[in-house]
């Protein structure tokens, strides 16, 4: 039975990158089944962001799979975008060019069917949740999540996001592991100011020049090599395993 980790966060906080890197770090820390990264975003299709250098024949769409009448384990395996060096790690998401008009509107039954199969075939599933209208996948993931991670950045946008959405997020925000992600190369990021305004921050992911380089080179699917960054990733992983 898979453990579900739902990741939420403010716009521009680096949530997608953090979700992927946590999934990769956990994959390297466990032998307890496959690890799957799942993104339901149709505003910014994750596969287009994470695998821009992959050839078309190695890119698959979550939407094409969900368009099937029934979902089986084989369907998920055939639609995972994989990383050569990670045998039991894969990503599910929409491709660049796809949008909310590309596929029929999802039903609750289809979403439940997706998670029923994921529960059986994986050890861990990381869901890169969105706040997009009618995103049933994120809503369902948050409802069944074993762990919730809240990603924030040290800026006014994150503080406003949390003050405006904390009541709507309800118990999800209350029980979330709160991660402050330093995604800009500031000499003195205002960490203390953010901590004084946002309570219960558990971890601070440092700025990583190497991760920034992966963004620029289209290599985010590769595991982080920055030792300081990975050390903090490992601490987060240890709290959710």
Image (cartoon, helix red, strand yellow):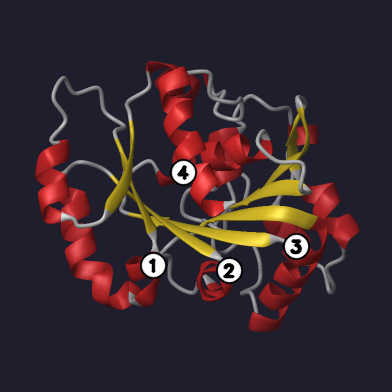
Q: Is residue 134 above or below residue 208?
A: below
Q: Is residue 131 above or below residue 82?
A: below
Nearest to N terminus: mark 1 or mark 2 = 2
The image quadrant of residue 104 is: bottom right
Count residues near mark 1 (Cα–Cα under 10 Å), then give few for <14, some for 14-19, many for 20+: few
* Mark 2 secondary-structure assignment: helix
Q: Which residue is mark 1?
A: 175
Residue 76: give x, y in percent of width and height: 80, 55
**Circles 4 and 3 in contact, beta carbons < 8 Å:** no
Q: Which residue is mark 3?
A: 118
Front tag of 1 and 2? 1
Q: Residue at x 46, y 43 (%)?
A: 236
**Circles 3 and 2 in contact, beta carbons < 8 Å:** no
Residue 189: give x, y in percent of width and height: 16, 30
Nearest to N terminus: mark 3 or mark 2 = 3
Disc 4/disc 2 C-alpha distance (Å) = 24 Å
């Amino acid at each position: 039975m898979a453990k579900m980790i739902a990741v939420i966060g403010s716009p521009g906080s680096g949530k997608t990158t953090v979700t992927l890197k946590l999934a990769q770090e956990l994959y390297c820390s466990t032998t307890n089944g496959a690890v799957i990264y799942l993104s339901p975003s149709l505003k910014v299709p994750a596969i287009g962001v994470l695998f821009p250098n992959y050839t078309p024949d190695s890119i698959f769409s979550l939407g094409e799979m969900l368009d099937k009448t029934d979902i089986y384990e084989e369907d998920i395996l055939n639609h995972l975008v994989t990383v050569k060096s990670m045998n039991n790690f894969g990503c599910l998401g929409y491709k660049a060019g796809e949008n909310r008009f590309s596929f029929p509107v999802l039903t609750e039954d289809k979403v439940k069917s997706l998670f029923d199969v994921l529960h059986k075939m994986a050890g861990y599933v990381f869901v890169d949740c969105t706040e997009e209208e009618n995103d049933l996948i994120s809503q369902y993931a948050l409802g069944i999540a074993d762990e919730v991670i809240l990603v924030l950045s040290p800026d006014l946008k994150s503080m406003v996001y949390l003050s405006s959405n904390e009541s709507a997020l309800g118990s999800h925000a209350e029980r979330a592991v709160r991660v402050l992600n330093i995604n800009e190369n500031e000499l003195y990021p205002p960490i203390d100011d953010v901590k004084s305004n946002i309570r219960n921050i558990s971890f601070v992911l440092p700025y990583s020049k190497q991760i920034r380089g992966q963004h620029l080179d289209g290599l985010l699917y590769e595991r982080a090599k920055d030792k300081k960054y990975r050390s903090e990733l490992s601490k987060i992983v240890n709290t959710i395993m």
